[in-house]
Structure formats: structure tokens, C-alpha cells
Image: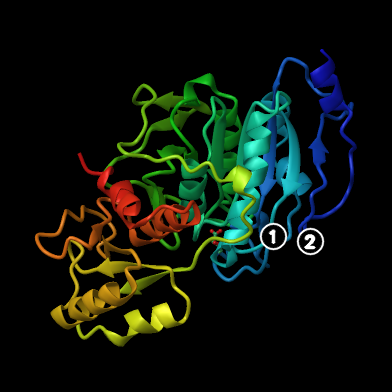
Amino acid sequence: MPLLRSFFNILVLAGTIHAVRDIPIVFRDAAMNFNQSLANVTVLTTGGTIAESGSTSVQTTNYGTPNATFQDLVNAVPELISVANLVGYAIANTDSQSINSTVLLRLNQRVTSELASDLTQGVVITHGTDTMEETAFFLDLTTQSAKTVVVVGSMRPASALSADGPLNLFQAVSLAVNPKAVGRGTLVTLNDRITSAFYVSKNHANVPDAFYAREQGHLGLFLNQAANFYYEPAQPVGKPFFDIAPLNLTTLPMVDILYAHIESNPGLIQASVNLGAKGIVFAGTGAGDLPEHVLDAARDVWNSTKIPMVFASRAMNGFVPYPDSDPWRIPSAHLTPQKARIMLQLGLATGLNGTAIHSLFDDLQI
Ligand code: GLU
């Protein structure tokens, strides 16, 4: 099997992932052999709690910066040796609040090329949990494959009494090689749960059971490390695909999220445009509303700039319907402000005009 043999021949390089690097680190068994009966999974590391440790076993906040290498991550889970052959690349090494569009685009390039490779049967991305839902959603909209992409992290650092990273990683790799996972889009797994990247949100800042889609639910559950799916594979209504890999983008257009509240400052809308925003997402009150004086300001800015403005909800769950006036308002449907922002960035990055961007969001409603 010549293709597989060349995979075996990838150089084993010791090293850390403190700096971003594009050198594969290969995980093999004690005899340094790949298992020809197992699938090959590529792990892309970006940092986050899963790569962090505190100073004591009871510390579960403020534990520092990512310092575990891919090798450290997989060394903590020797059981992986019977699940897949792994190769790891560091794409970034950061807490996820500092992920930016350059990292997202780098991830898209790497994931796209891995999915196209005969040497790779699945991809796992390790990521901080704070913005995991954005990265996972971005990858869901920018990849299309009969192979599975899984995004995983942990809520507890590796040093904690109840460290969840090792089991989460084991389950993520298991999912990446599971034929039953195919056709469900990008997946997120933590805390024994399997959830669609399209719908998942981080719903708690501290506890391990933080990731779920309150409205759409989980796709499945791990039991004795076997994935049990509740449904046959299905895709979210209106999910678009943005074929951005060939565009070689290095950054995504600037889109700001403005949070609505009583006495919101209407001047922030024009200020945002002045600072370079090419689109605005409102985290509106309730079903995407703004205080009247803020809506007036948004209308004025739209009339003078025609930049797309998407109306989401600060309630974080629920539906923003079509507006009964002001048809320039783009309702986010069920997308949270942060997911609506990613979709708007992708629409702008691929050159869609205002009507096409409106349709992109309209398609989420049937
Ligand atoms: N804020 C950090 C991050 O998102 C730590 C949170 C975590 O990974 O759980 O990367």
C-alpha cells in the first residue's frame, strides 16, 4: 500500500508547540509502529484549557497559558493507540479568546487539505472552549467531505482532579474514525456528548457540562466509549457551504457585534463603520429588537452605507423572525450573534452582494 507507506515515513520530530509550527509530530506505539488496520487521524492543536495545567489539583480557574504539546496530549491517553494512527500539527497556541480570522483561515486551509488527502481519514481540532463554537461553526460552513471533522477541548486543566481533556480527546478521535459520524457536518464533543457544530453553544463558564444546543439538542452520547447516535445523519436547514480554500484569504472582513440594552448608545453604529466594519450584527433584545432611537440610527447608517446589518438576539436562544418593517434588516433566525457574525464575514469574504447576504440568512427559515 504505497500511500500508507509514505504516511509511515513522515519524520518524527521531537519538539514543543509553544511557537506555531507546521511540522508534524507523530504518535506511534512503543515499538514505533503504525497499526495498518487503523485509520489515520490528523490532530490540529490550537491551545486552550485542554493544553493547560494549574499549580494544584483543585485549581480550576486562572491556570495559565497553553503549554502541553500534541505529544503531551496523546501521551495522557495511551488508549488512543488502539483507536487511530495520529499525526499532530500546531496551528496556534493560544487561549481561544485570542483566536482570530487568520487562525481560522489557516485551520480551513489545513483541514481542507487533510480531508482531500488519501492518507487522512479524519481530523480532530483541539481548541479552547470560550470561542470553540465560532471556530467549529466556521469549519462547518467551509468544509465539505465524506470524512469527519471533530472539535474538542476541555473545561478542566490537565492538572485538575476531574480533568476532562483526556477522555474528551479519546472520544473525539473515536468519532473522527467512526463511519456513523459521517454526514453530520462538523462535530463538537465534550463531556460524553456529541453535538452539531452548527448549533452548539458554550452555555456555562465553569462546569464540564457546558456545551449543548438548548433548542436542537445533542446528536448522541458516548457510553462505554461507544458513540450512540439518536438520529440518522442529517444537515441543518439552509446550511451554506463557502468554498474559501482556493481564495487563499489571510483575513476575514471586519464585522462588529453591538449589544442592545436599555439606553444603548446609537452613536456606536456609525463609530463601528468609521473604524472599518463592513457589516454589523446586533445582539438585539428579545426577538432581535433595538430601542427605537438605536433602530433610527441603524436605519440612517444603512441608508448612507448599505452595509449589511444582521439582527440576532442577546437571549442567545430562540428565533429572530422577518421584521414587519424595515426590510433591510436581516434576521439571524436561530443563529447567535457570534455565529451570525461568522456567517456574515464569510458572505462578505466571498463577495456576496446585499441581496445574496440577505438570502443566506433567509434560507435558515423555512
Ligand atoms: N479562556 C480559555 C480558552 O478559551 C480557557 C477556556 C477553556 O479552554 O476551557 O481557551
- What is the x, y in percent for residue 98? 58, 67
Query: At 46% from the left edge and 28% from the top edge, which residue is drawn?
Result: 223
Query: At 40% from the left edge and 44% from the top edge, which residue is drawn?
Result: 198
Between residues 16 and 342, which one lies in front from this camera angle? Answer: 342
- Secondary element under disc 2, as helix, strand or loop, is loop
Q: Quadrant of the N terminus?
A: top right
User: Residue under circle 1?
Assistant: 93
- What is the x, y in percent for residue 84? 69, 27
Q: Is residue 113 left or right of residue 285?
A: right
Which numbered dot is residue 288?
none
* N-terminal-most mark, 1 or 2: 2
* Residue 252 visible in the shown view: yes
- Secondary element under disc 1, as helix, strand or loop, is loop
Query: At 60% from the left edge and 44% from the top edge, which residue is drawn?
Result: 245
Taking the view exactly as shown, the residue that stands out farthest to the top is 1
Which numbered dot is residue 19?
2
Q: Is residue 119 left or right of residue 171?
A: right
Q: Is residue 28 left or right of residue 244?
A: right
